[in-house]
Image (cartoon, rainbow, N blue to C red):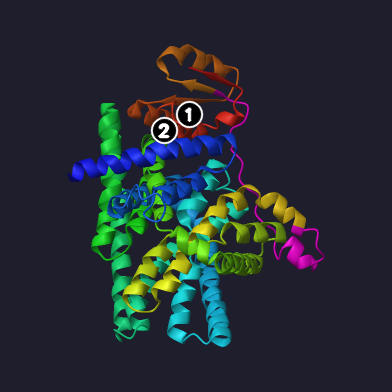
Amino acid sequence: MHEIEFLKVIVIIFGLASLVIFIFNKLKLPSVIGFLLTGIIVGPYALGLITNINIIEILAEIGVILLLFIIGMEFSIKKLLKIKNIVLLGGAMQVGITILVVVGILHFFTHIPYNQAVFIGFLVSLSSTAIILKVLQENDQVETHHGKISLGILIFQDLIIVPMMLFVPFLSGETTNVWNELFLMLAKTTALLGVTFILARWVIQYILHKIAVSNSQELFLIAIIVFGLAIASFSAWLGLSLALGAFLAGLAISESSYSYQAIGNIAPFRDVFASFFFVSIGLLLDVSFFANHWVTIITITITLIALKAIIIGLVSTLLGYPFRIAFRSGLILSQIGEFSFILAKMGVSNNLIDNYFYQIFLAVAILSMSVTPIFILFSKPITAFFAKLPMPKPIRDGLRELPKVKLPELNGHTILVGTSQYSSLMRSMELANITYVIIDTDADLVRNLQIQGINAVYGDAHYKSVLEEASTKNANNMLL
């Protein structure tokens, strides 16, 4: 019976989502909004086609894990260290200032008790990693300045969610040993980082090379999934988030030579399961409640977006970025995050918020998430409009000179897919001083070529991530 229920949910979601996404593609609207709309339509508060939300929540969690897993693989530890100031300083300022502002507004204007105000500040301070990074990736904006600001702040938010969860019982008065809990959490985080570092440094590279030599794509895919789920499971076993473990697992694999092939293997699964996350969010919305309180909900949503955009824009300005980048980053990060849903459920069970506020929160969160893809796509013209307003020169131009976005080193080169049929051509190109890049699925051959100083990428040329690593956009020719 459970199998039939499971298949029924899958068929309903994919059936309706196919129609909705087809219409959205015709209208050139982001697919994320289409998935949210699908969830609202089939949910228990609309047509009632799906009432068992537990199945969707499990699939949604897998989607978030795979999404952050691939983000980690695409980013690498070296790139993470380059934005450490954004992660540590920018993220801490954003979360801290947001909580303080929310507490001030709620306590002094609505007289909400401090513990409830702080908890609501937690909910507001988080942004949606899943939606932002998905849309940024689809539009090749992750490596831009506003993309790096968004990623850095989101990483800090994903880290701070664990201390926030530990603080919830303290805010509700159920526990007083919060410092012991924080110390334990720090010890667990250190253990997770240590295990991940050991795997990245001495285990993953060796095992993936041995598997790649076997030339078995099935075995390679299974190994990647095992590594990702193992580290994510270890993170959950320690009491930390699955998402954090998945991100660190991706970072570990990114240090190997096979990350681009791994991305190509995992990406289709990510897109399928990530869609369940957005559908699961839509399922939570009570349509009748929204209809009865739409003025309140829209007013709070507009206030929330404006407040977060201003705070994040201010933080970006303090980090030295000019107005155009700072304001654009604020727009992108101005919604409620998916981890806020987890916190909100804890708040209800700990009597920090009642059911009325919970429904208001759900409606505001979904509405703010729905407009996020639009803000990202149109953030440039919106920012250009506000940039015309008079403002001090340091704010307009930034407090420091920004590093240039690194361009691919290869330009005007030729890409050779495979090597056996091009051995004589390679020698001729070397004599003619023509730059070329080799893409091959022979792991030993690729390693030997790299040792010789030849540009070589391991992977299947059918995958976009492998082609991007070979700088296909800047190539003059590609021979298959």
Q: Is residue 46 magenta?
A: no
Q: Residue furthest left?
A: 1
Residue 299 visible in the shown view: yes
- Identify the residue position indicated by label 1 in the image: 454
Q: Position of residue 108 (x, y in %)?
A: 57, 87
Q: Amino acid at mark 2?
A: Ile
- Identify the residue position indicated by label 2 in the image: 451
Residue 207 visible in the shown view: no
Q: Would you place residue 397 above or below residue 215 in this image?
A: below
Q: Which residues are magenta?
A: 386-414
Q: Is residue 409 magenta?
A: yes
Q: Position of residue 224 (x, y in %)?
A: 30, 41
* Of 130 and 394, the residue lying toward us: 130
Q: Secondary structure at mark 1?
A: loop
Q: Residue furthest right?
A: 390
Residue at x-position 24% and y-position 44% = 5
Residue at x-position 60% and y-position 68% = 299
* Of 257 and 62, the residue lying toward us: 62
Q: Secondary structure at mark 2?
A: helix
Q: Position of residue 443 (x, y in %)?
A: 34, 29
Q: CA distance from mark 1 to mark 2?
A: 7 Å
* Of 132 and 258, the residue lying toward us: 132
Quarter of the image containing the N terminus? top left
Q: Quadrant of residue 236?
A: bottom left
